[in-house]
Amino acid sequence: MSPTSTVERPSKKVAAMASLPGGYAGKLLRVNLSTGRIWTQPWRPEEMRECLGGVGLGAKILYNEVGPKVHWDHPDNRLVMATGPLAGLPVWGTGGLTVVTRGALTDGATSTQANGFFGATLKYSGYDAIVIQGQAKKLSYLYVNDDTVEIRDAGHFKGLDTWQTQQALEVEHGLSGHRMSVYSIGPAGENLVRFAAIQGDYGHVASKNGCGAVMGKKRLKAVCIVRGTKALTAHDPRGLIQAADDIAHDLKTDPSTSTLYNWGTLPGVTNLYKLGVLPIKNYTTNVSSVNMDDWAPAKLRHGFDHRGHQCSACGMHHCHIQVIPQGPRRGELVDEPEYEGWSGAGWTIGLTDKEAVSWLNTRIDRACVDVNEFGWVCGWVMECMEKGYLTETQVGFRLNWGDVEGAYRLLQMISLREGFGDVLADGVKRAAEKLGGEAARCAIYTEKGASPRGHDHRGRWDEMLDTCTSSSGTMESANPTFQTEIGLPGRINPFDGEQVARLTGGILGRRHFEDSLGGCSFTFRTRIELLARALSAATGWHWSLDEAMRFGRRTASILRAFNLRCGIGPEVEYPSERYGSQPVDGPARDHHVMKQWEHMLDVWYETVGYDRKTGKPKRQTLKKLGLDWLARDLWGK
Amino acid sequence: MRAATVEVTTWVTKYVGGDGSGTRTFEEPVAPGETVRDVLRRYSKRFPELDAALWNPTRTALGEHIEVLVDDAVLGVTHDLDTPMKGGERITLLGQFMGG
């Protein structure tokens, strides 16, 4: 363990620091892994107001610093690990981390979130974000302890999974629990699996668009932050506490969010099944003979010994650590799967043994693989083998629906790029294109190459449209949440393409605002008005609902402009054949999204104010958003 | 008298005497000419908490957070609130799911 550099402080006190808004540390930590240089970059209050943090900040850095020829695996690609102005303050779930980079699946913009303690710990160390560039000569990790920032040798962590890496770092530094936050990659990231994730604090995952492969390419095994000692204050502490209490009250008592408060995302399994949105066996059916009452949230949680595993400042009954109660893995500690885990490590691959799903889900996290894409890859292989499109000789063994041992074997092959795993490690789109024929017709992906979330979007057209038009490498508008607050209808016909497109386009921006604040997307499933109040109290600025949405749309426009510059345009805003197919059974069986797709795109483009032909945000849209500079970039003078 | 089945699921069961999980079912009479709205109004009046959650504050339209399905189709697809009921239908009240 030999330090190679320590942080350079700015040579002069920056005048703006004296008038730093509340909630900000005031500095970005910059790291060049190629040269070993580490320095801090102050940012001005005007920049903070314009970019906030999280994806708002990351999008601007990506646009300014990553040119079209800097692909995901180029050393000059940036890996932005940003938090936001609410992180570290007493608002629920404010340990938030947003990873922004040019990702490996789409080779375009990525914004992906995780929680735990990273954001709070980083802020207490005196930084609002870490911006990493370059490529280390050997496997390294970044150590942050207030003003001591070092790039250290991580050769002895090579091959460790993410939980082992965190444990090893805890031993190395003699710190445990919440005294140190670690986000790391496992074998999949080291081996540049295109859907590798960055996992941290035992069970939190920034999972989308291969951000873990970017980290692996930089030969950065982990970022390890000791809980810092710097002051962090809100502009109006009483006002912030009032807003935080109102958010908490909303989460606890509102009929829809109280389910998140009590059960996290566990209710998704039974609810989405009822709507035909639970993905079963790679979209081959939407009907199961399993008793769905056994999949009710209480059964999923109380079927295991469990304890709370809350993130920074969180009072939700969401994250839990479980103990496998029986069977061959009895006694093993696992992370309670999110809904996405139950679907990606379970239903998508025909696995309905709950202990097995929970175990496999944690193994996927530990390998640092995105559970959604793993589900699509593994389910695709299972279906192709069942139908004879793939042989045992090709894959290396027989893999049947619901075979947990086989799925784990496949996970290892992918993580290490062994045998057929090397083909699969590039994601299901590239694997399907390589195989071609009937096999290719079964694969679930977007033409951009991104993974859909763990839903059957053939019954949830808003999410399919969002996934395909997104510029963030995953859903960009995400689920409608209190959309009546911004004048949109509370409910629509989910199979009326026009209504779907107006709603999906109408809520664009909300998510970017949330993801710029440094908190959790679940505790922030509240009214924007309350988030704006919390932000105002934290910073001393006045933020309104309208301004929040406008900010979000600005960020969406920047990400889109970045993607267009990368060559990702409207021609790839389509689902694959299977992804856009008509369900054969279940509640959505009478509806085929592709019959309305072109009209949905027309309406979506009109709603968001983008040009349908070129994909560019229109000049007048950009001007309304105050993005004159971007209008000049995209449309000339 | 004809009847419809009202199926209450997930967290919505808390409002009708359940524990917030699983399913509870009720038989609800359907008089000639009654619509989905009529049947739902009469049913929800028996459960004040459900009534508050199911409808908007002025009770003129449904609120945002409980999905209503008729024969497995979300309201708006084959039925709306003013569609007459024949009896024999299954109305499902499904708590909106946020997250995941």
Image (cartoon, grey):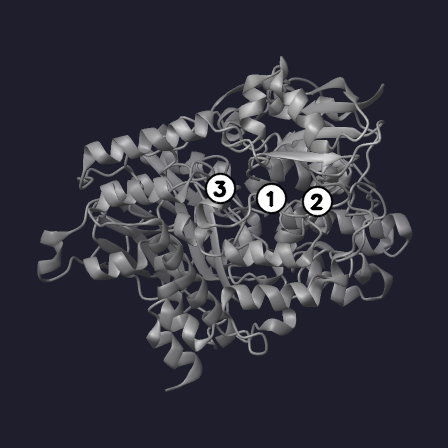
Q: Which mark is residue A491?
A: 1
Mark 2: which secondary structure?
A: loop
On screen, residue A346 versus residue A487, left or right, reads right
Q: Chain of mark 2?
A: B
How many residues crowd mark 1 within 10 Å: few (<14), some (14–19), many (20+)?
A: many
User: Are the residues tagged 2 and 3 within 8 Å (C-beta)?
Assistant: no
Q: Which residue is under mark 3?
A: A482
Q: Nearer the viewer, residue B37 or B92?
A: B37
On screen, residue A295 versus residue A525, left or right, reads right
Q: Amino acid at mark 1?
A: Arg
Q: Amino acid at mark 2?
A: Gly
How many residues crowd mark 3 within 10 Å: few (<14), some (14–19), many (20+)?
A: some
Who comes first in sequence, dot 1 or dot 3? Answer: 3
In this view, the residue farthest toward the bottom is A637
On screen, residue A158 versus residue A575, left or right, reads left
Q: Distance from label 1 to label 3 (Cα)?
A: 10 Å
User: Are the residues tagged 1 and 2 within 8 Å (C-beta)?
Assistant: yes
Visible residue check, residue A621: yes
Q: Distance from label 1 to label 2 (Cα)?
A: 9 Å
Residue at the spot x=42%, y=75% of the render? A620
Q: Which residue is under mark 2?
A: B76
Does A185 appear above or below A13? Answer: above
Residue A447's spot in the image, x, y percent? 67, 65
Q: Nearer the viewer, residue A47 or A417?
A: A47
Residue A367's spot in the image, x, y percent? 57, 44
Residue A500's spot in the image, x, y percent? 63, 54
